[in-house]
């Protein structure tokens, strides 16, 4: 079977382009190029992302990610759901930080309705938001080691992530898909004893961050595999709409927790927005480690200042959202996650545009992988940190 | 716009948005069709289709929106299938077909909309344009490189062509796929074959019909 027939229909054009590149190469260097398929089923792709690389020896001369193996059509599905039902859908977008996906949608609906959650609900929302960030990023830190052949970090990450998942389960009832956020507030208040337990877990997580810092980031092999690899300059990062740690690692001081006014409790806390001037793989990983530390501090501060009161505002039993349009985005674990919600005064939204972070973050890959060596492909992909559900939606 | 009165203009961010409107107007002139500023919140502008790319360059260079957020399209036609709650065994209901656009108005069924943000001034602009019968809009790829995948997605989901985009391959669907799934007249098959069980959620429980319209604490 020739390579031509093995490729799917949709890859034809891409294949022709790679053949053209190959022909040029043969003329110039008198070497034979090779097409390397990474994925769709490959541990380094965190799901079903396929990356087609044209190689010249060990060097990638052309790369194209092929997403869409997990497209679930959430934008279409939101049009046939009521507003409260949409949270069930959207918390499956980035499945490692599910609660964080619900928040911007609920905020957009609340903005359209002109209501705001009570202060206690805002605090608890922010706490759970930061807990999902910790759960998400600690998995990243563990997984990062595996990509480079270090096995120990993944066990440590899964051990400590379990404490956080237990907390999320304790408060919401769901480990992965809490579906806890409601228009006007939260489903329930925090359970008894949860606050003290959370403080203990935050101490453990800070220790985990220190261990990771020593074990992984201080490791000479790790540094040599990531420093100066996959450099994204500031201008390019902004052009592609990279967000979150990927953007801050390129030296852009932009964090939606600090840089916008939304009814959440981040404005009541002190935290540092870390940036790194290098823009390489190491910078992206390092920023995430620092952010996990900051998240634990945010949670501690919010637990100290947790106000009393109800967790639910007065909302009608049947929620009809007035006609209008609203855009709300938040700084999710993977980057900027936003919803553009258009309502026609109906029970459900007329149109929801879901702006997910990984979609933009991964669209830079064809630009970024050109000229890198094959082993670095894996570390660069790992450092960009994407979740497949967040690309395909 | 002149509709904004003085006390609101003192809020932070509004002077920024008003200035952005003025800058766009002086740069684009007639091509800037309509604007809407919600003080302290957000702003919307609508431009003529032929000025779409020019408007993008103006956003990036004149107003300084360095960060590309997203680009997509809206189909303003009401869905002939409603919200997918019909019983598929019953004959289909008559539904309104009037196309009503949202903020900043419009003339066509489809509109392309995008958002760009300034990472230093901390505000963004929602920009949109009508899509004529040829369903073609100039590509934003020369303006923001990140528009590449967004335009590909928009092309396969809405059937809108972006003139100047080098590679409008499908991202999600097989290349022979017929139809554009995000159009309102594209049926959601799952809702066509059997009644949606979730409908019970929005009906008041027995005995609660009277208080359903009032507020409830829980």
Image (cartoon, rainbow, N blue to C red):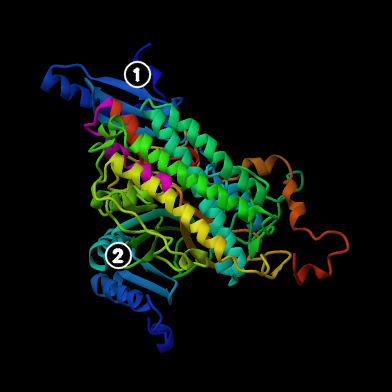
User: Camera-side residue: A175 or A39?
Assistant: A175
Q: Is residue A364 left or right of residue A333?
A: left
The residue positioned 27% from the left and 68% from the top of the image is B63
- Measuring from the top left, give residue A6's x and y in whole percent: 40, 18
- The chain holding disc 2 is B
Q: Residue B128: which disc?
A: none
User: Camera-side residue: B198 or B216?
Assistant: B216
- Against B124, residue A206 (above or below) is above
- The chain holding disc 1 is A
For the residues labelled 1 and 2, the Cα–Cα distance comes to 48 Å
* Res. B175 in view: no
Q: Mostly what secondary structure, the magenta segment?
A: helix
- Measuring from the top left, give residue A138's x and y in whole percent: 47, 41
The magenta stretch spans residue A365: yes
The residue positioned 70% from the left and 39% from the top of the image is B193
Looking at the rendering, the stretch of residues picked out in magenta corresponds to A357-374
The residue positioned 59% from the left and 65% from the top of the image is A306
Q: Quadrant of residue A320?
A: bottom right
The residue positioned 57% from the left and 64% from the top of the image is A122
User: Camera-side residue: A126 or B44?
Assistant: A126
- Measuring from the top left, give residue A350's x and y in whole percent: 57, 59
Mark 1, secondary structure of its residue? helix
* Quadrant showing the C terminus of chain B: bottom right
Mark 2, secondary structure of its residue? loop
- Measuring from the top left, give residue A249's x and y in whole percent: 30, 49
Which residue in the protein does label 2 denote?
B120
| Residue sitting farthest toward the top | A1
Assess disc 2: are there few (<14), some (14-19) or many (≥20) residues with their C-alpha within 10 Å of its C-alpha.
some
Which residue in the protein does label 1 denote?
A4
């Amino acid at each position: 079977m020739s390579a031509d027939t093995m490729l799917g229909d949709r890859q034809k054009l891409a294949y022709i382009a790679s053949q053209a590149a190959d022909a040029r190469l043969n003329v110039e260097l008198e070497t034979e190029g090779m097409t390397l398929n990474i994925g769709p089923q490959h541990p380094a792709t965190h799901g079903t992302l396929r990356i087609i690389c044209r190689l010249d020896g060990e060097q990638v001369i052309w790369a194209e990610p092929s997403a869409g193996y997990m497209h679930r059509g959430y934008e279409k599905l939101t049009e046939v759901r009521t507003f409260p039902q949409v949270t069930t859908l959207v918390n499956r977008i980035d499945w490692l930080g599910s609660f964080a996906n619900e928040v911007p949608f609920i905020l957009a609906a609340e903005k359209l309705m002109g209501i705001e959650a009570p202060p206690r609900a805002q605090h608890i929302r922010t706490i759970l938001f930061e807990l999902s960030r910790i759960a998400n990023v600690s998995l990243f830190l563990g997984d990062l080691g595996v990509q480079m052949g270090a096995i120990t970090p993944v066990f440590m990450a899964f051990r400590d992530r379990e404490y956080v998942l237990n907390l999320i389960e304790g408060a919401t009832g769901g480990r992965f898909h809490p579906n806890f956020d409601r228009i006007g507030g939260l489903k329930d208040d925090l359970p008894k004893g949860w606050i003290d337990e959370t403080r203990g877990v935050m101490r453990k997580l800070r220790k985990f961050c220190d261990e990771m810092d020593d074990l992984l980031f201080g490791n000479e092999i790790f540094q040599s595999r990531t420093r100066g690899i996959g450099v994204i300059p500031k201008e390019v990062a902004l052009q592609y709409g990279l967000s979150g740690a990927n953007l801050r690692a390129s030296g852009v001081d932009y964090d939606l927790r600090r840089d916008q006014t939304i009814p959440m409790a981040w404005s009541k806390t002190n935290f540092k927005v870390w940036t790194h001037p290098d823009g390489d793989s190491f910078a992206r990983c390092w920023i995430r480690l620092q952010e996990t530390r900051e998240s634990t501090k945010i949670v501690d501060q919010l637990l100290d200042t947790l106000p009393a009161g109800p967790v639910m505002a007065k909302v009608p039993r049947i929620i009809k959202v007035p006609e209008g349009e609203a855009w709300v985005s938040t700084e999710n674990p993977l980057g900027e996650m936003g919803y553009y919600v258009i309502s026609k005064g109906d029970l459900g939204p007329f149109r929801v545009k879901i702006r997910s972070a990984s979609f933009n973050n991964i669209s830079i890959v064809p630009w970024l992988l050109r000229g890198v060596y094959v082993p670095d492909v894996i570390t660069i992909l790992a450092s960009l940190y994407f979740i497949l559900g967040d690309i395909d939606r | 716009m002149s509709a904004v009165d003085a006390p609101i203009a003192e809020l932070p961010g509004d002077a920024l948005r008003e200035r952005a409107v003025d800058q766009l107007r002086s740069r684009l002139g007639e091509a800037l069709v309509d604007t809407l500023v919600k003080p302290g919140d957000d702003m919307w502008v609508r431009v003529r289709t032929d000025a779409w790319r020019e408007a993008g360059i103006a956003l990036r260079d004149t107003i300084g929106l360095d960060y590309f957020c997203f680009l997509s399209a809206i189909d303003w036609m009401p869905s002939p299938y409603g919200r997918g709650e019909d019983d598929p065994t019953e004959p289909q209901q008559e539904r309104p077909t009037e196309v009503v656009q949202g903020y900043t108005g419009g003339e066509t069924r489809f509109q392309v909309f995008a958002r760009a943000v300034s990472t230093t001034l901390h505000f963004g602009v929602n920009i949109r344009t009508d899509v004529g019968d040829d369903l073609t809009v100039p590509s934003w790829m020369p303006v923001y490189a990140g528009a590449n995948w967004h335009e590909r997605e928009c092309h396969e989901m809405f059937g809108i062509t972006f003139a100047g985009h080098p590679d409008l391959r499908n991202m999600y669907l097989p290349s022979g796929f017929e139809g554009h799934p995000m159009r309102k007249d594209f049926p959601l098959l799952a809702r066509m074959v059997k009644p949606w069980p979730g409908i019970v959620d929005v009906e008041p429980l027995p005995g609660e019909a009277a208080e359903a319209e009032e507020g409830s604490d829980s």
